[in-house]
Image: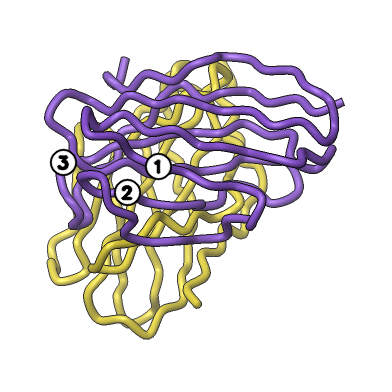
Chain colours: A yellow, B purple
Amino acid sequence: AQTVTQSQPEMSVQEAETVTLSCTYDTSESDYYLFWYKQPPSRQMILVIRQEAYKQQNATENRFSVNFQKAAKSFSLKISDSQLGDAAMYFCAYRAGGADGLTFGKGTHLIIQP
Amino acid sequence: DSGVTQTPKHLITATGQRVTLRCSPRSGDLSVYWYQQSLDQGLQFLIQYYNGEERAKGNILERFSAQQFPDLHSELNLSSLELGDSALYFCASSVGESPYEQYFGPGTRLTVT
């Protein structure tokens, strides 16, 4: 079974600084997809970024980028120029290529210090 | 707003009861997924439907069942409720079966007393 591990229960960063959230996963599949979701206090799950395992290029969405290390099974999220609105729980998620749901990590609580 | 709607927003019921949670996917999406978020278990995938057919099962209890109707809305039925079933239940939808992005609804908060 696939597992997703987020080793940082909580992270804190100063506004405008850069922060990196860690995620590792375990799978025997060769075709899979990785995601970062954000869950603010409203509890809404918001997709932040997606990475296909077959792509070597790291995904980027504005201030959010990933460092995908396939051999190490690592998928970290970098948030640049942190803003107060980035404060939330961040979940790393994995999905195999076929029909299936997402496997989530336990989440990292990100605090933005003004 | 993701375009996925869930009703009701909150539900309070007693142990042993049965409830039905409803989800309407985004316009054009054929896949619906159900997830449970609890303090103990975190976020867990329960079940997936695609165009009315069950496609994948996760950690769904036998007391729970789901279906997707011809108009593509989905219902999650929870029966013989226990205190441990108290959780936030999310529905998500995507265009197809492949790992397209899943868009989540606002969730239904279930409290079992």
Check disc 3 and report the residue beneath it.
Answer: B95
Number of numbered markers: 3
Pointer 2 or 3: first along the chain: 2
- Circle 2 SS class: strand
Quarter occupied by the C terminus of chain A: top right
Q: Could you confirm whether marks 2 and 1 are on the same chain?
A: yes
Q: What residue is rendered at 24% in x and 49% in y?
A: B50
Report if the CB atoms under discs 2 and 1 are less than 8 Å apart: yes
Pointer 2 or 1: first along the chain: 2
Q: CA distance from mark 2 to mark 3?
A: 12 Å
Q: Which mark is residue B67?
A: 1
Horizontal side of B109 relative to B86 (left or right) equals left
Question: Please, which chain is the residue tagged with disc 3 on?
Answer: B
Horizontal and vertical percent position of residue A36: 38, 46
Horizontal and vertical percent position of residue B100: 19, 48
Local crowd at mark 3 within 10 Å, few (<14), some, or many (≥20)? some
Q: Amino acid type of disc 1?
A: Gln
Horizontal and vertical percent position of residue A26: 46, 77
Q: Amino acid type of disc 3?
A: Val
- Circle 1 SS class: strand
Q: Which label lies toward us, 2 or 1?
A: 1
Question: Please, which chain is the residue tagged with disc 1 on?
Answer: B
Q: CA distance from mark 2 to mark 1?
A: 7 Å
In this view, B88 is above or below B32: above
Q: What residue is rendered at 56% in x and 14% in y?
A: B9
In this view, A70 is above or below B33: below
Check disc 2 and report the residue beneath it.
Answer: B49
Pointer 1 or 3: first along the chain: 1
B108, A82: nearer the viewer? B108
A47, A85: nearer the viewer? A47
Residue A29, image quadrant: bottom left
